[in-house]
Amino acid sequence: MKFFIKTFGCQMNFNDSERIKGILKSLGYEQAQSYEEADLILINTCTIREKPDQKVYSHLGEYRKVKEKNPKALIGVCGCLAQRAGWELVQKAPVIDIMFSSFNMHQLPELIHQAQAGYKAISILENPPEDEDRLWEYPTVRDNHYCAYVTVMKGCDKNCTYCVVPKTRGRQRSRSLESILSEVKSLVEEGVKEIHLLGQNVTAWGQDINMHFSELLYRVAEVDGVERVRFTTGHPKDMDERIAKAMGEIPQVCEHIHLPFQAGSNRILNLMDRGYTREEYLEKVQMLREYKKGITFSADVIVGFPTETEEDFEQTLDLIEKVRFEQLFSFKFSPRPETPAYYMEEQVPDEVKTARMERLLNLQKKILSEISKAYEGTLQEVLIEGEEKGKLVGRTRTNRWVALEGPEELLGKRVLVEVLKAHPYSLDCRLLSVLP
Ligand code: 5AD
Ligand code: SF4
């Protein structure tokens, strides 16, 4: 029996898919090369904006053809759109045999069983079940052998007025320290060097179990064999001095943070209910720069939130110029059903959003080319993660992609390189030495 998983959305979803693959492997399934040869096709969906919603229907249309050749093949849908749309999705696409939410991935074995017996196996839960921690008993199956995601919390307790996540992933639940450390230890034993802690709101880890995210950073870095630590996504509101200090003190924590600001205008930040002002955001950036020398920033930003004026938007541009992000993920505001922003008056017309987005992208392009130029001639530490087009590839501690010539034996090693030439999204480098 073979499975095929198509994943949309964020790293959380990708990590969920890695866990689902682990569940399927434990049931004796093998990974198919293409969906055509699969006995079980799963789509792990995203619903953060309107676009990913639509993609699911076109994929279902394609995948249903598999059933013509192999009537026993099963089609499943899981993830955030499944959670949000539930039965509505099955009504629109009766080809679906299995559906589960982000709360009950661990029930997949039972659901497959039901579907094989000819029933529609649909289980969308309103709330996380008591036994959701059973999920951690399964291993993950990863494509990258040296850098691994580790989910440390689920859900989100913030109430950003544009966002569906609290609805699709529920209240914030921190995974226990023991469970996280045990996964980290077994990953390191498998040869993983870089641990990337994941959560919708990872800097809030511990708040519901009387612990603090900084403690998690120290404990993970203490595990023998952990050479690098990263985390995503940080929330500016929870980003406090304890975390900044830990980042500075722990050598394994890389010089990079993804810290979405979403908007540069205080009026819009307030309407978004983000819980900080632009001044506070900039202060936190400054604090991080002081504690963690050489740190680089990336962020998410939304363009065209309801009521956004030209002045508001200029504040966003101004913030971008002040911080000088290495990478910016920018999104046109997409009204999501059942979120407060969906119902706000004075929605910004699409042409305005598009025009502002273009200006933002042009500014970012200019900043990025200046930042990139400054890399030329510098020395960087790179963890070699894989091979592409005959070259070794990896990332700098500041999260830049690097390509270089070198022998295969360097896979999984940290090396020192000299940057020869900078492209907007990657750096050509020359190998200097292998680091101990
Ligand atoms: N419209 C546009 N962008 C959104 N994001 C979240 N919700 C919306 C929405 N309704 C963006 C935010 C978030 C990223 C994952 O997606 O910038 O940080
Ligand atoms: Fe998409 Fe948000 Fe779900 Fe991630 S958590 S898959 S971004 S809706």
Image: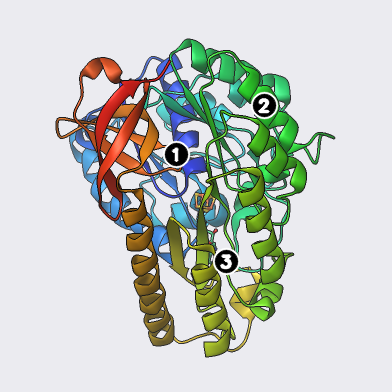
Please give the count of numbered marks on the rendered protein: 3
Going by the image, does 17 lie left or right of 404? right
The kind of residue on which mark 2 rests is Asp
Q: Residues within 10 Å of mark 1 (few under 14, many from 20)?
A: some
Q: Is residue 176 above or below residue 360?
A: above
Q: Is mark 2 within 8 Å of ligand 2?
A: no
With respect to residue 388, does 190 lie above or below?
above
Q: Position of residue 86 (x, y in %)?
A: 54, 52
- Between disc 2 and disc 3, the foreground one is 3
Q: Residue at x 50, y 19 (%)?
A: 139
Label 3 sits on residue:
262
Quarter of the figure with residue 229: top right
Q: Circle 2 — which element?
A: helix
Nearer to me, 182 or 405: 405
Instruction: Look at the numbered disc 3 and give the secondary structure of its residue.
Output: loop
Decide which of tag 1 and tag 2 comes sooner along the chain: 1
Residue furthest to the top? 189
Of the two numbered discs 2 and 3 on the same chain, state the one appearing first in sequence: 2
For this orientation, the residue located farthest to the front is 377
Residue at numbered disc 2: 133
Disc 1: which residue: 14
Q: State the quadrant of the N terminus.
A: top left
Residue 97: percent from left, percent from top = 41, 40
Quadrant where the C terminus sits is top left
